[in-house]
Image (spheres, helix red, strand yellow):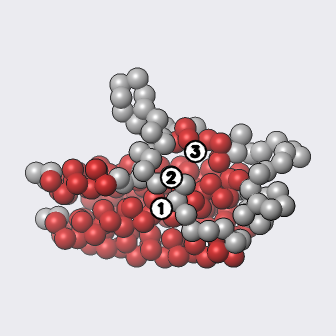
Amino acid sequence: MTLLAALPLAGCGAEDDRGAAPDVTPVAEAPAAGATDPATVDGGAAHGLSGTDLAWLQLMAPMNDRTLLLLELVGESGDDAELGAFAGELALTHAEETTRMREILDEAGVPDTNPHEGHNMTGMVTDDELAEIAAASDVDAAAREALHEHLAQSAMISGSAAENGSDEATTALAAELAETREGQLASLEALDA
């Protein structure tokens, strides 16, 4: 199973039996040898990208976009100066990563679309979540929780894409992002201490 096939299990509306999004996403397996990847077949949009590469890019770019909205909210409405500074740093890295992801998609001839639009996925900040955080009695605490989920989920997904993808630029960026997210997660946890 490729990451593309595993992504619906990552929380695209998936809920556990308590009605909450699952905490753990299955790690994708590499495609079977000789398997035909629909994203790379002649006539497919993603020339040179495997299904895993394409799935990761098309998930992480919107995840970053949505997180940038949260980071902006923290800067505007939060009271914790340290968290605000951390959010500013995250915004810079997220914007730079997203630019690089979109460059890879553009070079591969893939349209800049979000196949996950409207899906409630672990690590993806939704409009409802943004509204809840903005209305929370403690914006900083609510934002920390959402940031923790985003950083942990994107680190895990990126690590899987780095291991199972095939495009050199994509897997290098995924590996870099996984490492960056682990460091950012540790920094966030240090702020919580």
Q: Is residue 132 left or right of residue 52?
A: left
In the image, residue 171 sits, relative to residue 99, either above or below, namely: above
The quadrant where residue 19 appears? top left
Reading the image, the residue beneath label 3 is 7
Q: Residue 182 has which mark? A: none
Residue at image position (79%, 50%) is 37
Badge 3 or badge 1: first in the primary sequence: 3
Q: Nearer the viewer, mark 2 or mark 3?
A: 2
Number of residues whose C-alpha sits closer than 10 Å to that of mark 3, classed few (under 14), some (14–19) or many (20 or more):
many
Extreme residue toward the front, this view: 43
Badge 2 or badge 3: first in the primary sequence: 3
Reading the image, the residue beneath label 2 is 116
Circles 3 and 1, Cβ within 8 Å, touching? The answer is no
Q: Is residue 125 left or right of residue 1?
A: left
Number of residues whose C-alpha sits closer than 10 Å to that of mark 2, classed few (under 14), some (14–19) or many (20 or more):
some
Reading the image, the residue beneath label 1 is 62
| Residue type at the position of mark 1 | Pro
Q: Position of residue 175 (x, y in %)?
A: 61, 61
Number of residues whose C-alpha sits closer than 10 Å to that of mark 1, classed few (under 14), some (14–19) or many (20 or more):
many
The quadrant where residue 100 appears? bottom right
Question: Rounded to the nearest whole Å, what is the CA distance between mark 1 and mark 2?
Answer: 8 Å
Residue at image position (24%, 66%) is 73
In front of the other: 192 or 88: 88
Extreme residue toward the left, this view: 137
| Residue type at the position of mark 2 | His
Question: Label 1's element?
Answer: helix
